[in-house]
């Protein structure tokens, strides 16, 4: 169960509420209730995606379904059914319609070996385009790629200034890629 601390659930609820209201036009007398409902539904979808990514990251770090179930206030079986393989793991964005490209899954990999595996794949022209549980979706390109994993904090623009692109958000990580411009090595 979630522990209550000085910066606990109440602060989180206030931060989420502020994020939902941020960007809505200020009304003189009354907020647009339908806009608030829409933004809250969008926030719920994002929070569900973040939870799925957090569970995937915990699994790749070696945590058991029983431990995760206890954290989530559910049984091991319920956690595995809700978040396990085939239960809607993060999928890569689709390629442009009509585009033909070679894609495959790289894995299984863990938080301990994925960067080394991505470095090898990157030299061969494969770049990460998505993340699933214990695997990366990679796409073949004619050039070599650098891969990097960073904690998901702050603005992404600081990485973009150095030529990095976000390949996949997988809470608590951001997976970044950067094209080196060097022709891909041959298999």
Image (cartoon, grey):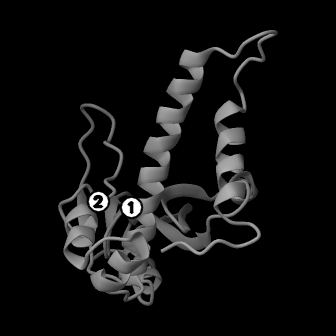
**For the residue labelled by badge 1, is the local secondary structure a helix, a strand or a loop?**
helix
Q: Label 1, label 2: how many angstroms apart (C-alpha)?
A: 7 Å
Q: Which one is earlier in the sequence, the residue at label 1 or at label 2?
A: 1
Residue 128 in sight in this render: no
The percent position of residue 102, horizontal first and vertical second, equals 24, 55
Query: Which one is nearer the viewer's eye here, 9 or 135?
Result: 9
Q: Quadrant of residue 174?
A: bottom right
Q: Residue at x 29, y 81 (%)?
A: 65
- Which disc number belongs to residue 89? 2
Residue 50 in sight in this render: yes
The percent position of residue 139, horizontal first and vertical second, equals 33, 58
- Which disc number belongs to residue 52? 1
- Crowd class of label 1 (few under 14; some 14 to 19; many from 20; radius 10 Å): many
**For the residue labelled by badge 2, is the local secondary structure a helix, a strand or a loop?**
loop
Query: Which one is nearer the viewer's eye here, 61 or 168?
Result: 61
Q: Residue at x 47, y 57 (%)?
A: 50
The percent position of residue 153, horizontal first and vertical second, equals 69, 63
Query: Which one is nearer the viewer's eye here, 183 or 3?
Result: 3
**For the residues carrying marks 1 and 2, which lies nearer the camera in this image?**
1
The reply to whether dot 1 and dot 2 touch (C-beta < 8 Å) is yes
Query: Which one is nearer the viewer's eye here, 185 or 66?
Result: 66
| Residue 40 relative to residue 12: left or right | left
Q: Residue at x 31, y 71 (%)?
A: 74
């Amino acid at each position: 169960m979630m522990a209550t601390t000085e910066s606990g659930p109440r602060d989180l609820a206030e931060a989420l509420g502020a994020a939902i209201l941020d960007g809505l036009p200020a009304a003189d007398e009354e907020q647009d209730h339908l806009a608030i409902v829409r933004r809250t539904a969008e926030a719920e979808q994002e929070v569900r995606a973040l939870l799925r990514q957090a569970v995937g990251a915990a699994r790749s770090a070696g945590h058991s379904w029983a431990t995760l179930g206890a954290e989530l206030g559910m049984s091991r079986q319920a956690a595995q059914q809700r978040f396990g393989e085939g239960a809607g793991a993060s999928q890569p964005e689709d390629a442009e319609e009509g585009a033909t490209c070679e894609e495959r899954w790289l894995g299984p990999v863990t938080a301990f070996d994925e960067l080394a595996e991505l470095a090898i794949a990157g030299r061969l022209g494969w770049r990460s385009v998505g993340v699933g549980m214990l695997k990366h979706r990679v796409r073949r390109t004619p050039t070599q790629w650098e891969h990097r994993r960073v904690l998901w904090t702050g603005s992404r623009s600081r990485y973009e200034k150095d030529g990095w692109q976000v390949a996949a958000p997988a809470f608590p990580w951001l997976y970044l890629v950067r094209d080196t411009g060097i022709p891909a090595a041959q298999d």
